[in-house]
Image (cartoon, rainbow, N blue to C red):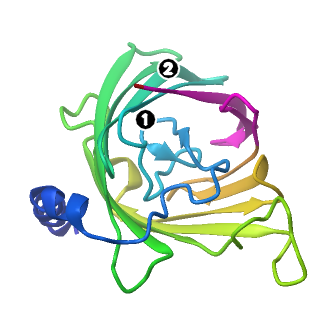
């Protein structure tokens, strides 16, 4: 599985110029909602697992996470459309601090305009555990959940399913976001080891916060964005 993931990653990164030019529907954060937070290990995603989305081109996402046994800052940068790079600093209790790099590419299938596929790499220099992953994300939310009408739902949802080596143990991981508006959402995930959950909120000035349970312990996270 790990070898297949590495091959898939190489092919997808080689295809990045094609991905930029492909005339597909823009679905990266289509609602401007609460999906653009940095994860524990850096990439855009839920709590510990990545989703298929990336930071927008020219956007810098600054984040931080705090828990009983683990805390640290993170930065993601949208280097170009549908491609982000990032770094996360991890402070584990009882061990040395670690800095890990990450990169992710989003692919948008032409014939499935609400599905995105993310292929990424976490910790390529093996500071913790080098990881390659593939994840699919599908947005089943109506166009405007903050102003429902007779033909739209009041609640939206995004679903995520992937597989990864390294920190994901060559197992499946999965997650879901239930959006009650374009500002509030409930997040749940299986990261191949634990079930994690949080409540998210996005403010008017694009600051996002979440709090909940990660690895069976309480945690808090924050992400904000700058665009250049």
Question: Horizontal placement of 158 versus 94: left or right?
Answer: right
Instruction: Tell me which segment is drawn in magenta.
Output: 201-227
Toward which corner of the image does residue 97 lie, by quadrant?
A: top left
Residue 61 on the magenta span: no
Task: Give residue 103's position: percent from left, percent from top.
Answer: 28, 42
SS at circle 2? strand
- Residue, x 70% and y 29% (percent of image)? 220
The disc, 1 or 2, on the residue closer to the chain's N-terminal end is 1
Residue count near mark 1 (Cα–Cα under 10 Å), binned few <14, some 14–19, many ≥20: many
Q: Which of 149 and 181 is in front in this view?
A: 149
* Residue of label 1: 42
Task: Give residue 68's position: percent from left, percent from top.
Answer: 67, 23
Picture disc at residue 73: 2
Task: Give residue 114's position: percent from left, percent from top.
Answer: 51, 75
SS at circle 1? loop
Picture disc at residue 207: none
């Amino acid at each position: 599985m790990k070898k297949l993931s590495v091959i898939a990653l190489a092919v997808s990164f080689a295809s990045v110029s094609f991905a930029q030019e492909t005339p597909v529907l823009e679905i990266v954060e289509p609602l401007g909602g609460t999906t653009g937070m940095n994860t524990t290990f850096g990439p855009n995603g839920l709590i510990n697992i990545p989703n298929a989305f990336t930071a927008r081109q020219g956007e810098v996402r600054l984040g931080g996470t705090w828990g009983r046994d683990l805390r640290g800052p993170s930065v993601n940068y949208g280097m170009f459309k549908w491609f982000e790079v990032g770094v996360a600093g991890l402070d584990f209790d009882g061990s040395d601090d670690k800095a890990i790099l990450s990169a992710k590419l989003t692919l948008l299938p032409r014939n499935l305009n609400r599905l995105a596929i993310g292929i990424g790499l976490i910790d390529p220099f093996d500071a913790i555990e080098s990881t390659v992953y593939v994840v699919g994300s599908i947005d089943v939310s109506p166009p405007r959940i903050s102003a429902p009408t007779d033909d739209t739902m009041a609640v939206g949802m995004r679903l995520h399913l992937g597989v990864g080596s390294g920190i994901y143990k060559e197992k499946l991981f999965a997650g879901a976001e239930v959006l009650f508006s374009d500002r509030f959402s409930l997040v749940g995930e299986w990261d191949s080891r634990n079930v994690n959950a949080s409540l998210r909120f996005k403010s008017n000035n694009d600051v996002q916060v979440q709090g909940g349970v990660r690895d069976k312990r309480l945690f808090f996270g924050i992400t904000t964005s700058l665009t250049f």
